[in-house]
Image: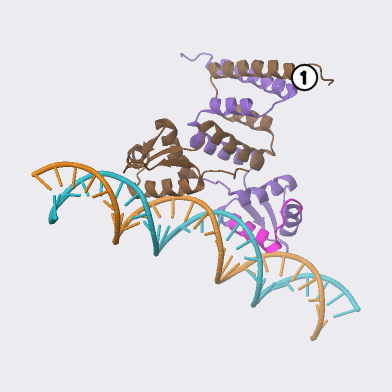
Chain colours: A purple, B brown, C orange, D cyan
Amino acid sequence: MTKQNKPTAAELEILAVLWEFGSATVKEVHEKLNEIKPTTYTTVLKFLQIMTEKGLVERDDANKAHIYRAALSQEQTQTTLVSDLLEKAFRGSALKLVQHVLETKPTSADELAEIRKMITEAEKQTKDETQGEKK
Amino acid sequence: MTKQNKPTAAELEILAVLWEFGSATVKEVHEKLNEIKPTTYTTVLKFLQIMTEKGLVERDDANKAHIYRAALSQEQTQTTLVSDLLEKAFRGSALKLVQHVLETKPTSADELAEIRKMITEAEKQTKDETQGEKK
DNA sequence: TGACATCTACGAAAGACTTCGTATAACTTA
DNA sequence: TAAGTTATACGAAGTCTTTCGTAGATGTCA
């Protein structure tokens, strides 16, 4: 039974670097993160250690410079985060969340077309899945 | 410049009750919240006091039993929360967030139709706004 | 081998979050 | 007005998050 792996804000920033790099040493993570936000090497190291304990990242300590990588994919983590937000702020309604985003975030014509395409796909699936089932 | 009013998890639970009731006394909030999650009166009171300091709720202390109400609408708070998630986990791309939700959350045919309608609306707007502009 | 550079480990501190116990004030009513 | 009820205020404790400083281990190379 997997624990609720919800990374904190600072942990997420590190995960973002790891997702981008695939895997990286503390040094690499620190250098990348430092471009965006001033931080010290040991702070990054500490987070990586804590996150290892939590199971958020995995460590290869075969060499002197340990190599870290995210334990969960970005998609899996996004799912956790979105589910959490859904529960906490949208009473679990994915529809309400999507509506809210469409209403508040300016969306280009291209993007709208993208979403429309996705809906068509999803509708096809829904139809397939319902085939043979009695409503 | 308004501060970043991002309620914590426990604060959000209380806000949810306030949004539902419009306004309420500590007693009312406690009773409602207690149905969902065991909590004590003084804990709820303490949160309401802290949230008053933070400006998350407003208090009418004309009577003995103070009456609280959310300082920001649910929509405003949702916007804050979604923006935060967007930045932290989706590199600011609303499109990616919507795609993720559509891919991971089972969505009924009715809901898909709802979203499609919204997109049509949004496309209309986009067209209006772009009128006269050179692409 | 000794000096220097590069890493990890450990621990501590500050602040935020969450919860609750106790004190105190105000109101009611007999 | 004294007792009982209903509220708020205050403060403290425990946990989690975030940040760093210092120590110690390991590797390099002249």
Query: Which secondary structure dominates the residues rendered in magenta?
Result: helix
Residue A98 lies, with reference to residue A17, above or below; the image says above
Quadrant where the N terminus of chain B sits is top right
User: Disc 1 marks which residue?
Assistant: B130
Taking the spot 54% from the left edge, 31% from the top edge, the residue there is: B75
Q: Chain of mark 1?
A: B
Location of residue C29 in the rendering, given as x and y in whole percent from the top left corner: 13, 42
Instruction: Verify whether residue A37 appears in magenta.
Output: yes
- Where residue A131 sits, quadrant-wise, is top right
Taking the image as shown, residue B21 lies to the left or right of residue A67, namely left
Is A102 in the magenta? Answer: no
Q: For residue A24, say whether it is visible.
A: yes
Q: Is any atom of residue A124 visible in this view?
A: no
- The local crowd at label 1, few if under 14, some if 14 to 19, many if 20 or more residues have their Cα within 10 Å, is few
Highlighted range, magenta: A35-52
- Helix, strand, or loop for circle 1? helix
**Coordinates of residue B63 in the picture (x, y in percent):** 33, 41
Q: Residue at x 32, y 39 (%)?
A: B31
Circle 1: residue type: Thr
The image shows residue C1, relative to residue A1, as above or below, that is below
Image check: A109 left or right of C25? right
Front-most of residues A54 and B83? B83
* Count of marks, rendered view: 1
Task: Answer with the quarter of the image where residue A117 lies.
Answer: top right
Q: Nearer the viewer, residue A65 or A100?
A: A100
Give the quarter of the image for residue B4: top right
Q: Residue at x 52, y 34 (%)?
A: A86
